[in-house]
Image (tube, rainbow, N blue to C red):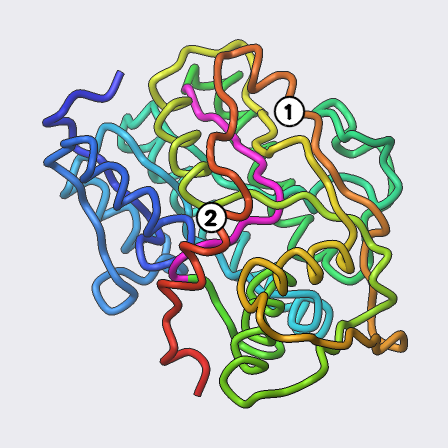
Amino acid sequence: MIRKNSKIFVAGHNGLVGSAILRLLKLKGYKNIITANRKKLDLLDQKKVFSFLKLKKPKFIFLAAAKVGGIYSNNKYKANFIYENLMIQSNIIHSAYKNGIKELIFLGSSCVYPKFAKQPIKEKYLLSGELEKTNDAYALAKIAGIKMCESYNEQYKTKYKCLMPTNTFGPNDNYDKLNSHFIPALIRKIYEIEKFDKKKLILWGNGKTKREVIFVDDIADACIYFMNKNTKHHLINIGTGKEYSILDYAKLFLKALIPQKKIKISFMKKNLNGTPRKVLDVSLARKYGWKSKTKLVDALKYTYKNLNKINFK
């Protein structure tokens, strides 16, 4: 159980999920939060990570640090994605164990599951089939993190938990044209339609791909909830249990964000579609008493209102 004065290290506090965890911890009154940017701590350097944790002595770690990106960058820069993620998570998990830190939350991704997994996807489907080729390097790194936590729990009696969020969006997201996920990419396109008075929204793929999305503040809520929860399971899906096609999201976003404009939707079908369908089975999380709280439209409007326009230059 985290106490208000417990030492808590949030790794990746400037990222989408890490910043949400940091905001929520502060909002809940936790006062002893440790953070370090890349200049202060190189997470790719095991010696520095070990020395940092030895010096700071946190009791709890939220491992939200990772190299992330959209379908384009995951497919083009596979070596970077597998190397950096393996190093970051291995350095933190191993150094946590070596420093006697038994409580850790590792953030993964729903892409760890097979491309053609039965829907909705249960935690037990991990390693039961072939991965989606466009992001298999990133997925394999995250799978290694899951198995590392599981192995350390079994051998060293740690209490490391792995939360697998579905597609996440919210404030402090990455809106880069080539390196963002589909939700921030869609939000950016709608912002540019509004700003430059465009008449058309162009989507990658055929629009039929189905996805589940969740607001980042709900992910942060789940992280703190499960850090405070004793569980028999080390791997837990975090999502809403609801899915829509990319085309459905586009229509919903246009209606919610710029209802006054009539926009034509077209497709670049030659571009990658990724996994055809992906919705998580969240019954285990609900069994433990957690479920998402934020309505999609409310989260979308809040995110759009608080966009970091600097990323759009």
Residue lying farthest front?
260
Q: Which numbered circle lies on residue 299? A: 2
Q: Compared with residue 250, is residue 96 higher up or lower down, i.e. above or below?
A: above
Q: Nearer the viewer, mark 1 or mark 2?
A: 2
Q: Are marks 1 and 2 in contact (CB under 8 Å)?
A: no
Q: Which residues are magenta?
A: 159-172
Q: Where does residue 22 sit, x and y in percent of width and height?
A: 27, 45
Residue at screen point 57% across, 10% down: 287
Residue at screen point 34% across, 47% down: 20
- Residue 166 position by quadrant: top right
Residue type at mark 2 is: Ala
Q: Quick one: label 1, few (<14), some, or many (20+) residues within 10 Å? A: many
Q: Compared with residue 48, is residue 225 higher up or lower down, i.e. above or below?
A: above
Residue type at mark 1 is: Val
- Residue 77 position by quadrant: bottom right
> In this figure, which residue is indicated by the disc labeled 1?
282
Query: Would you say residue 194 sits in the magenta stretch?
Result: no
